[in-house]
Image (cartoon, rainbow, N blue to C red):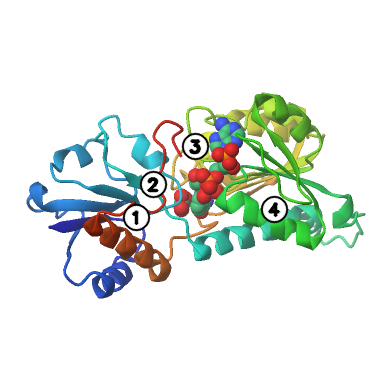
Amino acid sequence: MALLFKSESDRVEWWKQELGRRLPDLELRFWPAVGDARDIEFALVWNLPPGVLKTFPNLRAVFSLGAGVDHLFADPELPKGVPICRVIDSNLTQRMTEYVVLHVLRHHRRQPEYDALQRAGEWRELYTPTAAERAVGIMGLGELGADAARKLMSVGFKVASWSRTPKSIEGIESFHGARGLEPFLKRSEILVCLLPLTPETKGILGRRLFEALPRGAAVINAARGGHLVEQDLLAALETGQIAHATLDVFHEEPLPPAHPFWRHPRVTITPHVASITDPRTVADLVAENVRRHRAGAALLHVVDPEVGY
Ligand code: NDP
Ligand code: OXD
């Protein structure tokens, strides 16, 4: 039996080593060299073309190569009843927290404005409040959102969260559900999106949400491009309702060269690198799930197809 691997990163050799070391008796096949489809027992994949998984009659589990599983649920022919496991990993969480803290601080300390002043050769002080006077809102208080929220709190920010179900983390003001969204947005001067992409969250970063934020708010989207209504963001930047946006994820990746975000003076772009899936630690998780499957034990980090994350 075999594990099919498909990634979009250039770390295939690294994965080969890390998986091979942990699963020496499992044959590894690398997309698109599938071989006999009947051999594929496990799929460790990112953005596999739709319709492929259903061609593996002996598929026992699908492992997402990332924390998000929207790329799998986007397949209309996803085989039913095959468990889907996602990545929960301390390295992935740590890297995301680094990204969030970096960009929240950058907005808080008005660095995009200082960058513009530097380009203009202008020496000018801009008033900055302390972190204790700055309200940061985290959308999604899951594995990633909760860690980022705690670390932002330790820097001193006033942190609030918004999630689907109620949460309670000491020091974090928690909002949830449709009714909690507006009061959460009203107080969030820097908004960070760390939601999964599901039918409920698609397009959530749109006109109504931007209007509910305090004027001049900053938005950081490190979740999925599908959360954002791009034209609504451009309009909100134009009016000044949103002062600046930091975007790591896009509807189309790579972001097309002619896209207006590239040259927008108040948009910061990173190429879907807020965090990465680290083969050194995630190969441990994959190997553990293969072992568990063989032992008839429950798999780790299985997602609920009903909620989509
Ligand atoms: P989790 O599943 O652990 O957390 C998701 C959070 O979002 C939960 O708090 C959940 O609420 C909340 N949520 C889900 N649906 C809704 C909704 N309809 N309304 C309000 N809240 C909702 O996910 P992770 O923290 O592990 O990851 C989050 C996302 O980050 C991933 O799905 C992926 O898209 C993105 N990501 C991006 C990366 C990058 O490099 N840019 C890297 C890794 C991940 P509740 O707790 O109540 O269930
Ligand atoms: C993920 C990602 O979901 O890298 O892990 O986006």
**Front-lying residue, 166 or 212:** 166
Q: Amino acid at mark 3?
A: Leu
Does residue 187 appear in the picture of this structure?
yes
Please report the residue visible at 52 percent of the width from the left and 58 percent of the height from the top: 275
* In the displayed structure image, the side of residue 218 where residue 10 appears, left or right: left
* Marks 3, 4: nearer the viewer: 4
How crowded is the residue under tag 1: few (<14 C-alpha within 10 Å), some, or many (20+)?
few
Please report the residue visible at 91 percent of the width from the left and 54 percent of the height from the top: 129
Question: Label 3, label 2: how many angstroms apart (C-alpha)?
Answer: 17 Å
Query: Would you say the beta carbon of the disc 3 residue lies within 8 angstroms of ligand 1?
Result: yes
* Marks 4, 1: nearer the viewer: 4
Q: Looking at the image, is 294 positioned above or below residue 164?
A: below
| Dot 3 or dot 4, earlier in sequence | 4
- Residue at image mark 4: 149
Please report the residue visible at 43 percent of the width from the left and 60 percent of the height from the top: 277
* Marks 1, 2: nearer the viewer: 2
Q: Looking at the image, is 114 positioned above or below residue 246?
A: below
Q: Amino acid at mark 2?
A: Val
Query: Would you say the beta carbon of the disc 4 residue lies within 8 angstroms of ligand 1?
Result: no
Q: Amino acid at mark 4?
A: Ala
- Residue at image mark 2: 302
- Residue at image mark 3: 197
Query: Would you say the beta carbon of the disc 1 residue lies within 8 angstroms of ligand 2?
Result: no
| Dot 1 or dot 2, earlier in sequence | 1
Local SS, label 1: loop
